[in-house]
């Protein structure tokens, strides 16, 4: 389900994060800066969605601090090879959302 752009609602649904959390992360992490369309709505690219999954993993799963996440995003911390890539996590989450929507239709 590759798309050029994702809306804030779609990103919120895929990541399980509230829109206010996404807006806060934009202020906290300079790497996350989605463009706004002509209506002023955020338009997230594929790379930004992967970055959100990476930040979420670092904060919520690995219990990094905000400063730790910033260092990890800059590559200042060693990577753990036994984790899924942000792209794989995003793809698996998209599949889960699709299957849940399909199940609701049945």
Image (spheres, rainbow, N blue to C red):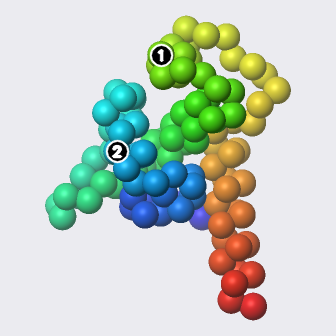
- Depth check: give the residue in front, 47 or 98: 98
Give the alpha-carbon distance from disc 1 to disc 2, as whole Å: 18 Å
Q: Position of residue 37 (x, y in %)?
A: 23, 58
Q: Position of residue 52 (x, y in %)?
A: 51, 41
Q: Position of residue 86 (x, y in %)?
A: 63, 38
Element marked by disc 2: helix
Residue 61 visible in the current orientation: yes
Residue 3 is left or right of residue 80, and the answer is: left
Residue holding disc 2: 23
Q: Position of residue 104 (x, y in %)?
A: 69, 84
Is 27 rendered above or below residue 67?
below
Say which mark, if any, is on residue 89. Answer: none
- At 63% across and 49% down in the image, what residue appears? 90
Residue 38 is left or right of residue 94, and the answer is: left
Element marked by disc 1: helix
Give the farthest residue toward the right: 82
Residue 20 is left or right of residue 64, and the answer is: left
Residue holding disc 1: 67
Is 23 rendered above or below residue 79?
below
Is 81 rendered above or below residue 3?
above
Give the farthest residue toward the bottom: 106
Figure disc tally? 2
- At 24% across and 52% down in the image, what residue appears? 36
Q: Are marks 1 and 2 in contact (CB under 8 Å)?
A: no
- At 55% across and 8% down in the image, what residue appears? 76
């Amino acid at each position: 389900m590759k798309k050029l752009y994702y809306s804030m609602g779609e990103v919120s649904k895929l990541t399980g994060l509230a829109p206010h959390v996404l807006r806060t992360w934009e202020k906290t992490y300079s790497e996350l800066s989605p463009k706004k369309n002509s209506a002023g709505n955020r338009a997230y690219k594929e790379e930004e969605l992967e970055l959100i999954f990476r930040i979420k993993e670092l904060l919520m799963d690995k219990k990094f601090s905000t400063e730790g996440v910033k260092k990890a995003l800059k590559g200042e911390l060693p990577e753990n090879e036994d984790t899924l890539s942000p792209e794989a996590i995003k793809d698996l989450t998209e599949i889960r959302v699709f299957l849940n929507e399909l199940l609701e239709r049945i």
